[in-house]
């Protein structure tokens, strides 16, 4: 094999040419570190930001992730509508935000305050901005329905929606996405046109939004790019619901759910209590929960694994996360504002950490699960 020959020529093992974290199944983001670090290079995320807004990616070193978690500081006065594929979950950390979405039934408005959250179909034109003249902070988690092909997250082809919601506007959106997909793969217009049996100028017109995209051509393009067909369809005729708001004032009345796979040993006290944050919204793949983590002895916990990925963000208290990397057990302590993105198929467990012997609840955590097998695979009704 060529790689072996190169390694032998340098007198090194093959492992020396691999990334140091190739087998690390988790990524930690420390609040104190990300806030002082310079913002990332211009990307899809930063391209969506409006003047005065900032955004910090919380899992960019996790290659192949299906969720894109961001810490975002929103500015008042943003006036442009944007869109991106699949779903978005937004949790307000500070301040108040105004949410507007263009649905088939008309334009809908919601005001959210600290502790409120919203889960919505982000393929529809929407706008999220701070209210009251002051900035607001929130956690935004975007879900991918298809497998990311690279750390560049080309599944999140996003942009600002043209004024109005006409057929011409939607054609521009689809054309822009097709052009971005083509460029992300380094293909020319001529190459893609030959792949799908189009004339070069016809594909150029489709990307410019001046020519309608026939369904049969859309199917061929989806196959060429390895994307689900739904990612090229604007869900303007979806009957809804198009979003679901969970108010912080309603949290005490939420009914907790039980994990289908036990996270504690037999006859041990239940370590965590799970409250669904999108129970009134039919979602695909992404399931946000508020977890109240109890202070229990580590010996009462059971290692568990399940299909999918998890993003955990600590709202209050301290969280101890234990998982495995390179066949070694590793433990990380997370404090408020810290987060962890992990491969849930690797054995792991979490517990609250506190010095008080009288405290039962020692951490509150925002936990967003990504699992294509459905919510019932993870939780009982």
Image (tube, rainbow, N blue to C red):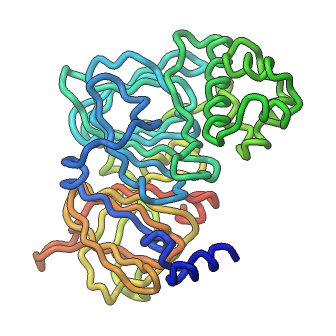
In this rendering, would 207 be left or right of 93? right
x%, y% of residue 74? 29, 30
359 or 196: which is nearer to us?
196
x%, y% of residue 100? 43, 22
Q: How many marks?
A: 0
Residue at the spot x=34%, y=87% of the render?
Answer: 300
Q: Is residue 2 above or below residue 162?
A: below
Image quarter hosting the C terminus: bottom right
Image quarter hosting the N terminus: bottom right
x%, y% of residue 112? 31, 32
In this rendering, would 239 be left or right of 50? right
Residue at the spot x=53%, y=19% of the render?
Answer: 161
Residue 256, located in which quarter of the rendered image?
bottom left
182 or 356: which is nearer to us?
182
Looking at the image, can residue 177 be seen? yes
Residue 368, located in which quarter of the rendered image?
bottom left
120 or 333: which is nearer to us?
333
Determine the residue located farthest toward the front in the rendered image: 9
Looking at the image, can residue 255 be seen? no
Residue at the spot x=24%, y=33% of the render?
Answer: 136
x%, y% of residue 94? 22, 38
Residue at the spot x=55%, y=57% of the render?
Answer: 64
259 or 235: which is nearer to us?
235
């Amino acid at each position: 094999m060529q790689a072996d020959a190169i390694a032998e020529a340098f007198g090194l093992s093959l492992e020396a040419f691999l990334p140091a974290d190739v087998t690390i199944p988790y990524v930690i983001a420390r609040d104190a570190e990300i806030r002082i670090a310079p913002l990332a290079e211009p990307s899809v995320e930063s391209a969506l930001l409006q003047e005065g807004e900032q955004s910090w990616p919380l899992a960019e070193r996790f290659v192949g992730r299906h969720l894109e978690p961001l810490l975002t500081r929103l500015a008042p006065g943003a006036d442009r509508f944007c869109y991106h594929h699949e779903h978005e979950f937004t949790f307000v950390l500070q301040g108040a935000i105004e949410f507007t979405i263009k649905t088939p039934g008309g334009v809908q408005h919601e005001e959210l305050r600290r502790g409120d959250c919203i889960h919505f179909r982000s393929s529809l034109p929407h706008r999220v901005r701070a209210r009251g003249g002051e900035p607001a902070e929130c956690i935004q988690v975007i879900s991918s329905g298809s497998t990311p092909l690279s750390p560049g997250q080309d599944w999140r082809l996003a942009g600002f929606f043209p004024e109005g919601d006409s057929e011409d506007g939607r054609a521009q959106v689809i054309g822009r996405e097709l052009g971005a997909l083509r460029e992300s793969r380094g293909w020319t217009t001529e190459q893609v046109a030959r792949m799908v049996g189009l004339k070069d100028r016809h594909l150029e017109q489709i990307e410019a939004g001046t020519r309608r995209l026939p369904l049969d051509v859309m199917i061929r393009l989806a196959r060429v790019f390895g994307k689900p067909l739904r990612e090229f369809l604007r869900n303007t005729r979806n009957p809804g619901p198009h979003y679901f708001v969970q108010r912080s004032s309603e949290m005490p009345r939420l009914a907790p759910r039980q994990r289908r796979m036990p996270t504690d040993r037999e006859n041990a006290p239940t370590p965590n209590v799970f409250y669904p944050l999108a129970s009134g919204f039919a979602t695909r793949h992404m399931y946000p929960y508020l977890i109240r983590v109890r202070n229990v002895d580590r010996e009462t916990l059971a290692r568990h694994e399940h299909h999918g990925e998890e993003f955990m963000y600590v709202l209050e208290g301290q969280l101890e996360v234990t998982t495995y990397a390179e066949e070694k057990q590793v433990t990380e302590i997370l404090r408020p504002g810290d987060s962890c993105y992990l491969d849930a198929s690797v054995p792991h467990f979490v517990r609250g950490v506190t010095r008080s012997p009288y405290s039962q609840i020692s951490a509150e955590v925002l936990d967003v699960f990504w699992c294509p097998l459905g919510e019932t695979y993870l939780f009982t009704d």
